[in-house]
Amino acid sequence: MTIVTDASDTAQAAADTGIQAFLVTFIIRRFDPEVDAEPRWVDYDVELYSTDRVLDALHKIKWEVDGSLSFRRSCAHGICGSDAMRINGRNRLACKTLIKDLDISKPIYVEAIKGLPLEKDLIVDMEPFFASYREVQPFLIANSTPPKDKERIQSIADREIFDDTTKCILCAACTSSCPVFWTDGQYFGPAAIVNAHRFIFDSRDDAADVRLDILNDKEGVWRCRTTFNCTEACPRGIEVTKAIAEVKQAVLRGRS
Ligand code: SF4
Ligand code: FES
């Protein structure tokens, strides 16, 4: 299928911006559980600008060609974490993947992230992912109450220890790029460990031992094989493998 916007509009836009439009072929793995026994690959030629992102191409296909194309997105600016997908075999956020950074001399393959049940097209069931997240108790648990009308004081150095893992947006790009998670859906996965790390190393929190005990399970941190897929996949640049290693150390030696 080819999607070409009105030629005069395109020419005008190009003249206004000085940016040239070009055709890009997308091959998208589609699946409609009400019709398809198996997923199928469907190709679309889309007219885009180099400033467009993969999310813009998906919008164009959905809005101009096939409204049934299903995918999640919300913020469109790398914050909500809802549009993680496999783009040319690599987990990325569609809203942060610029067309100019892809090789458009070849088709761009887009499919749902792996390891979670496929629901429709690019949408997977995220519930197993969030179940693991909930299990590590990703919230502050403090035994004491803060001084009246005061916040809990934390030094800059103490805050720095877990700064990296505060950046997680729960997109699941790490967990769904992990070969251990593909073969063992019971494994907590990198994202749950990252979010446990965020509280285990928070000096204001008193439940590190509880979380470390949870992650010292056969489906916990010891399932990690240090493949670094998670770190490479993380759109927030979190050193996921390093965080997992720090949690392993804490399981063995305690938090500090
Ligand atoms: S650690 Fe990175 S890749 Fe994993 S869920 Fe958080 S933001 Fe996404
Ligand atoms: S749509 Fe929110 S992160 Fe991409």
Image: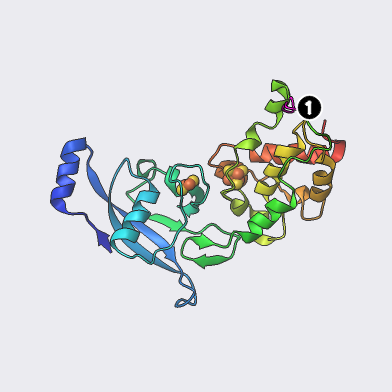
- Tell me the quarter of the image containing the N terminus: bottom left
Instruction: Point out residue 72 in the picture as x, y percentages from the top left corner.
Output: 47, 56
Magenta segment, prevailing SS (helix, strand or loop): loop
Residue 251 % position (x, y): 83, 41
Residue 42 in percent (x, y) is at 37, 66
Answer whether residue 107 is visible to the viewer in this image.
no
Task: Name the outermost residue toward the right.
Answer: 253
Instruction: Name the colour scheme.
Output: rainbow
Query: What's under tag 1, amino acid-wise?
Result: Pro
Task: Read off the magenta span.
Answer: 148-153
* Ligand 1: quadrant of the figure: top right
What residue sits 64% from the left and 36% below the top? Answer: 166
User: Most extreme residue toward the top, as rendered?
Assistant: 156
Q: Which residue is mark 1?
A: 147
Against 181, residue 143 (above or below) is above
| Rendered-image quadrant of the C terminus | top right
Please name the residue shown 31% across and 59% down the image.
63
**Relative to residue 220, is residue 125 depicted above or below?**
below
Q: Position of residue 116 (x, y in %)?
A: 60, 61
Could you tell me which secondary element the residue under label 1 belongs to? loop
